[in-house]
């Protein structure tokens, strides 16, 4: 029986680059608290498994054109701490960057949130793709992918040991005898690696969940290996059903080869649904968002320096295999023009038709602008009614392409609420998503067991080199002890 995992990837100003311009969209960061509170209430009433907060460790004018939600945002640890106090059932996942974070500080904060929320915290570990983060953290450059993942492996290992500093019953608090702590149940971390050195123990009691569920988001081969060996949830961007099936199979095979129970690795895909009362209504919303997104040609004196090159007719020409750079962006894409396009260009025309209802031979033809937008907005979009979107989700899960979805909402709050109040009940009606919270912790929502304390169950577990599928040596944790 399929049981989807559904979380909301919260972006306060909306997750479509022009979503903030949509009528009624939230656009003032001073109002973020109200928006987060309302999203949490709606998500919890819909019984979503978790709210998920990404992170970005720098800002700049270019980000306005890349995706405006990156420009200024609430720190994710602060967001989940705030929400822990005003929610009672939903999981709360914050992103942290292992390249720059300090493991002791992060272990303290996350163990604290888990205790304060009654076991509802989760942690998304990323290695970061933003080079400017280096300058904000006293480094002279953003390290190479391999180095970042070497540190991430140490980081995850240390985090689990820190969370396990106290055994579950280390604090005896026996008022009669006056004994508060059993010192034999408090364990030092004593980790001294190439990147990190932490003595421990952590000065926060063991989290309610033992270890917080760990998510990992990334794309490189090292990211796949890291997710397979260290994560509970792998967050992977997939381009289609077949791609999803292949990635999930690869991840689970890597997990199995690493000696862990591969069923404990859940594969989650980000998805951006556009929900409408009818298919045409949903397409009209997608069409509007497309029209609201500026492209390079919208600036009469040329786009600002920070504008991304891929949002231009020049870049579109490369993809189409036809030079359209001198044409107006509002030029209709006619069947005779499409006939000259490359296969990738023709595919793009179909994507636009699916999303916006505009087609070359139709009453409302697509324009070059629509093609530029579709090529530059790199999101897995599903446009349709609640029933159509639920059907798509179910198909993906039943085909083995995903275990669940991280749902992005193009416009806050309208599209998030259309999803929570429309699509979720459809999924529940189909029996692929529960109607009630059955457990109380995030682990329970995700169907994950509570891990043993590594100090107790496995003694002196060490980091050991293991080999990735491509034959290169990796530093990774000896897993067999931890996942018997
Ligand atoms: C779905 C998805 C979500 C991501 N979210 C974040 C994020 O919130 N913050 C961040 O710094 N990186 C995020 N990333 C980027 C990756 O974590 C990673 O740092 C980046 O892709 C570089 O590593 P890689 O070469 O292994 O992919 C995300 C990646 C994916 C695929």
Image (cartoon, rainbow, N blue to C red):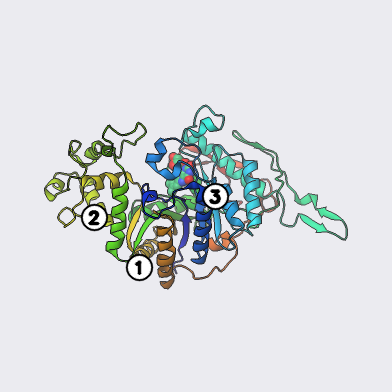
Using the image as rendered, state which of residue 207 and residue 272 is in the foreground: 272
Real-space CA distance between mark 2 and mark 1, rounded to the nearest whole angstrom? 20 Å
Name the outermost residue toward the top: 140
Question: Which residue is rendered at x = 51% and y = 36% of the image?
Answer: 148
> Position of 452 compared to 146: left or right?
right
Task: Give the alpha-carbon distance from disc 2 to disc 3, as whole Å.
Answer: 36 Å
Asked if residue 99 shows in the view, the reply is yes
- Badge 1: residue crowd in 10 Å (few <14, some 14–19, many ≥20): some
User: How many numbered marks does the figure carry?
Assistant: 3
Work out how far the residue at label 3 is from the one at label 1, CA to CA, in angstroms: 30 Å
- Residue at the outermost left position: 336
- For this rendering, which residue is in front, 385 or 304? 304
Disc 3 + disc 1, Cβ < 8 Å:
no
What residue is disc 3 on? 94
> To which residue does mark 1 refer?
387
The picture places residue 426, in percent across and down from the top left corner, at 40, 69
Q: Find out if the beta carbon at label 3 lies less than 8 Å from the nearest ligand 1 atom.
A: no
Label located before the other in sequence (3 or 1):
3
Earlier in the chain: of badge 2 and badge 1, it is 2
Task: Give x and y (percent) for residue 8.
Answer: 47, 56
Q: Earlier in the sequence, mark 2 or mark 3?
A: 3
The residue carrying mark 2 is: 353
To which quarter of the image does residue 101 belong? Answer: top right
Instruction: Identify the image quadrant of residue 389.
Output: bottom left
Q: Are marks 2 and 1 in contact (CB under 8 Å)?
A: no
Q: What residue do we see at 53% from left, 57% from top?
A: 37
The CB of the residue at mark 1 lies under 8 Å from ligand 1? no
């Amino acid at each position: 029986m399929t049981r989807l995992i559904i979380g909301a990837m919260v972006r306060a100003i909306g997750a479509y680059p022009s979503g903030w311009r949509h009528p009624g969209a939230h656009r003032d960061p001073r109002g973020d608290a109200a928006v987060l509170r309302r999203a949490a209430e709606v998500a919890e009433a819909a019984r979503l498994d978790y709210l998920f907060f990404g992170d970005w460790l720098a800002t700049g004018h270019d980000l306005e054109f890349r995706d405006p939600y990156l420009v200024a945002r609430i720190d994710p640890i602060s967001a989940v701490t705030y929400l822990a106090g005003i929610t009672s059932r939903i999981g709360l996942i914050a992103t942290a960057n292992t390249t720059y974070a300090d493991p002791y500080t992060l272990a303290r904060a996350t163990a604290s949130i888990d205790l304060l929320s009654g076991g509802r915290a989760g942690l998304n570990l990323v290695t970061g793709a933003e080079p400017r983060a280096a300058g904000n953290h006293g480094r002279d450059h953003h390290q190479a992918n391999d180095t970042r993942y070497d540190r991430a492996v140490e980081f995850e290992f240390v985090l689990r040991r820190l969370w396990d500093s106290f055994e579950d019953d280390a604090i005896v608090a026996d008022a009669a005898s006056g004994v508060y702590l059993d010192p034999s149940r408090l364990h030092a971390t004593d980790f001294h690696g190439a990147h990190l050195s932490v003595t421990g123990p952590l000065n926060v009691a063991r989290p309610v969940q033992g270890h917080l569920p760990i998510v990992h988001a990334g794309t490189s081969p090292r990211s796949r290996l890291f997710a397979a060996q260290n994560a509970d949830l792998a967050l992977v961007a997939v381009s289609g059903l077949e791609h999803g099936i292949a990635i999930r199979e690869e991840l689970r095979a890597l997990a199995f080869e690493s000696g862990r129970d591969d069923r404990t690795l859940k594969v989650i895909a980000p998805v951006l649904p556009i929900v409408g009362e009818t298919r045409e209504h949903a397409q009209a919303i997608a069409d509007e968002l497309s029209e609201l997104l500026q492209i390079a040609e919208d600036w009469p004196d040329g786009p600002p320096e920070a504008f991304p090159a891929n949002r231009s007719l020049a870049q579109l020409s490369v993809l189409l295999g036809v030079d359209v750079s001198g044409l107006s962006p509002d030029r209709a894409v006619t069947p005779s023009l499409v006939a000259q396009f490359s296969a990738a260009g023709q595919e793009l025309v179909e994507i636009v038709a699916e999303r916006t209802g505009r087609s070359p031979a139709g009453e409302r033809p697509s324009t070059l602008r629509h093609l530029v937008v579709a090529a530059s907005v790199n999101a897995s979009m599903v446009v349709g009614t609640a029933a159509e979107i639920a059907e798509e989700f179910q198909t993906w899960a039943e085909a083995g392409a995903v275990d669940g979805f991280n749902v992005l909402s193009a416009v806050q709050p309208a599209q998030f609420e259309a999803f929570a109040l429309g699509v979720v009940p459809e999924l529940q009606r189909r029996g692929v998503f529960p109607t009630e919270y059955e457990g109380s912790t995030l682990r329970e929502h995700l169907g994950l067991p509570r891990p043993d304390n590594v100090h107790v169950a496995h003694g002196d577990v060490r980091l050991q080199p293991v080999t990735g599928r491509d034959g290169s040596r990796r530093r990774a944790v000896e897993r067999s002890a931890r996942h018997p």
